[in-house]
Image (tube, rainbow, N blue to C red):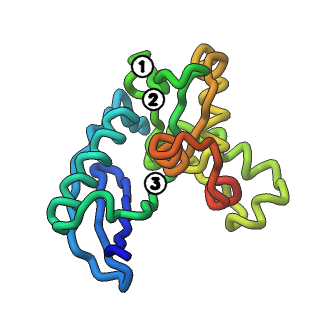
Amino acid sequence: MTNSFVCAVDVGTGSARAGILDSRGTLLGRADHPIAMHQPKADHAEHDSRDIWSAVCKAVRAAVAKAGVAADDVVGISFDATCSLVVRGRDSEQLSVSVTGEKRWDTIVWLDHRAIAEADECTASGHAVLDYIGGVMSPEMATPKLMWLKRHLPGTWNEAGYLFDLTDFLTWKATGSLARSQCTLTAK
């Protein structure tokens, strides 16, 4: 059997990072690539999911090169990312989450706090799900972001075909699978 390696990808606020590890967990190569952020007004922070995917691909290629391993020997990949919401249309095209209307800004970043009123509304509901998240809904979570989107950008809401947590978006881009992670479904 040939050597087997895994790739770990982490997407944060300003960059995508990738590492190549051997079967013992030794880091053999690491690389990162920046991601642009758009802040059209106070409490709004947006990413371009195409830019994120491009940054991931560049970071992975660079990490593989730095590790000095053959790409064919990378047998698995994992993704971790911030609690960011990616919105795509029914044909998987980008849909704007921005008050500017620019379609490239299709991702509400975790630190975006445009949905504070919606988060407060969720908290005030006293719903039992709050018991699992500390009793308070954060505007960084998906539910308030989705509520905000429906109320403030109804055109985008009505055109949406896919609503992804960023980690699940990355999995979809890499594999074509629409499966969602348990963490996304229960904690974000």
Question: Residue shown at 43%/60% (left/top)?
Answer: 77
Would you call the spot at circle 3 few (<14 residues within 10 Å), some (14-19), or many (20 or more)?
Answer: some
Visible residue check, residue 134:
yes
Left or right of residue 103: residue 22: left
Q: Secondary structure at mark 1?
A: loop
The percent position of residue 31, horizontal first and vertical second, equals: 20, 60
Residues at badges 1 and 2 in contact (C-beta under 8 Å)?
yes
Q: Amino acid at mark 1?
A: Lys
Task: Tell which of 69 and 78 is nearer to you.
Answer: 69
Q: Secondary structure at mark 2?
A: loop
Residue 95's x, y, as percent? Answer: 50, 22
Residue that extends furthest to the bottom in the rendered view of this protein: 24
Residue under the point 36% across and 41% down: 53
Kindly identify the amino acid type of the residue bearing the numbered disc 2.
Asp
- The label on residue 103 is 1
Q: Residue 22's x, y, as percent?
A: 32, 77
Judging by the rendered image, the residue that carries numbered circle 2 is 106
**Residue appearing at x 39%, y 18% in the figure:** 102
Q: Amino acid at mark 3?
A: Thr
Is disc 3 placed on a helix, strand or loop? loop
Q: Which residue lies under the disc numbered 3? A: 82
Whether residue 73 is situated above or below residue 145 in the rendered picture: below
| Quadrant the C terminus occupies | bottom right
